[in-house]
Amino acid sequence: MPLVHLSDMINHASRHNYAVGAFGVNNLHFLKGIIQAAEERRAPVVLNMIESHFENHDFELLLPAVIAAARRTEVPVAINFDHGTSLASAERAIRAGCNGVMVDTSALLFSDNLWQTRDVVTKAHACGVTVEGELGYVPGVEGEDAKHHPGELTYTSAAEAAGFVERTGVDCLAVSIGTVHGRMKGVPKLDYARLAKIKEAVAVPLVIHGGTGLSDDQFRRLIANGVAKINYYTALADVANRRIKANIAGERKGGQNSPLSGVSDAVREEVERCIHLWGCSGRAAEVLAQCRLWHDAEHIVFYNVSETLSESEIATTLREGKRSLEAIPGVRSIRTSRASQHDGEYRYSLSIGLASKTALEILRNHPTYQRFANTNFWPMITDHIALDLEES
């Protein structure tokens, strides 16, 4: 299971002067193409789940497929929630299975961006989840995502970047030095001098949003000046669209899936090109050796209850507990079960699925959990056994 901590992956890239690609996953064709490219190039990769795309698909349905693909590949993978709109959406992404989050408050005043990002960091770090902040504003022009990034470009200040990183505790920082979301008009002019100053001012890896439209030389200069993660989606959408249009124009015979024939291959080819250009090729083994594997955790209690309690009383207690426990950071699922045949030592079980081992530690000490356990749960139990499990 080569799902790894996103912060470890990006820090490895930063230390070794290359950039990891964070490629937008919009459907299963994109997922297949990105994973195949990473496997072919033996490269680490970030699967980017972009919130604005949720208008077109069900996040909770797509993400399990993304997680399954990450866990069965042999190259290091991280799953990042990108351009979230609120703390609540970041918490939703963590519960669903992302191990990195980015809530975009860069269009706000510096102080508002700082405080809101710090709130995200507090909640996410409690679960061991990586947080990317953004300072400066990268607008959108023409691309699929342009409507979600209106307005004018605002460059990142090195001085503000230093204060922002120190006061928020973000693990990496997306900066604005001349790129845009979507497709660029004309030749992009990037401020490398500004980027170099930002690199000197902060101690975390830098991220570039809006990678589509840049030249090979521009990518190399970005990486040379501290960029360790590059977000990339619009160009993937463009190659997919060209393949679909060619299929339709060629009047291919077949069923309703014929227009989608070869889309995964087109995405794979573009991702492979980027991986090679950005210096990721052949890095999989060293990243796996130097990065922590991401382990889910589970807290399970097997128990019996007092014979004086009715099934409806038990169900009410558990239902109310579930509602309160779901709000604890890192809690992904809560499942209650009853033995279908009571021939074992325990008749009931409570299973709490958690984002990570860190989230398990938070659960044990969280006042909401302790209140539920001490006031409602333990008093109704006659005997029990509790297990903390970590994925192996």
Image (tube, rainbow, N blue to C red):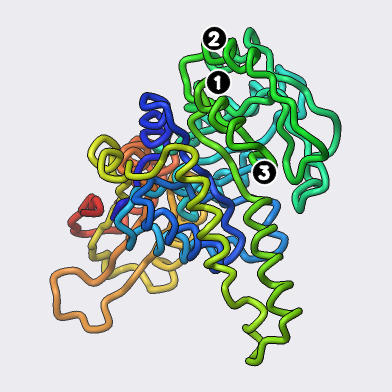
N-terminal label among 3 and 2: 2
N-terminal label among 1 and 3: 1
Disc 1 from disc 3: Cα separation: 29 Å
Residue drawn at (65%, 65%) of the image: 57
Q: Which mark is residue 201?
A: 2
| Horizontal and vertical percent position of residue 76 | 34, 48
Disc 3 from disc 2: Cα separation: 27 Å
Q: Is residue 295 left or right of residue 342?
A: right
Residue that mark 1 sits on: 168
Residue that mark 3 sits on: 212
**299 w.r.t. 192: above or below:** below
**348 w.r.t. 267: above or below:** below
Q: Is residue 63 left or right of residue 70?
A: right
Amino acid type of the residue that numbered disc 2 sits on in the rendered structure: Ala
Q: Nearer the viewer, mark 1 or mark 2?
A: 2
| Horizontal and vertical percent position of residue 310 | 37, 72
For the residue pair 292 and 221, the one nearer the viewer reads as 221
Quarter of the figure with the C terminus: bottom left
How packed is label 1: few (under 14 Cα within 10 Å), some, or many (20 or more)? many
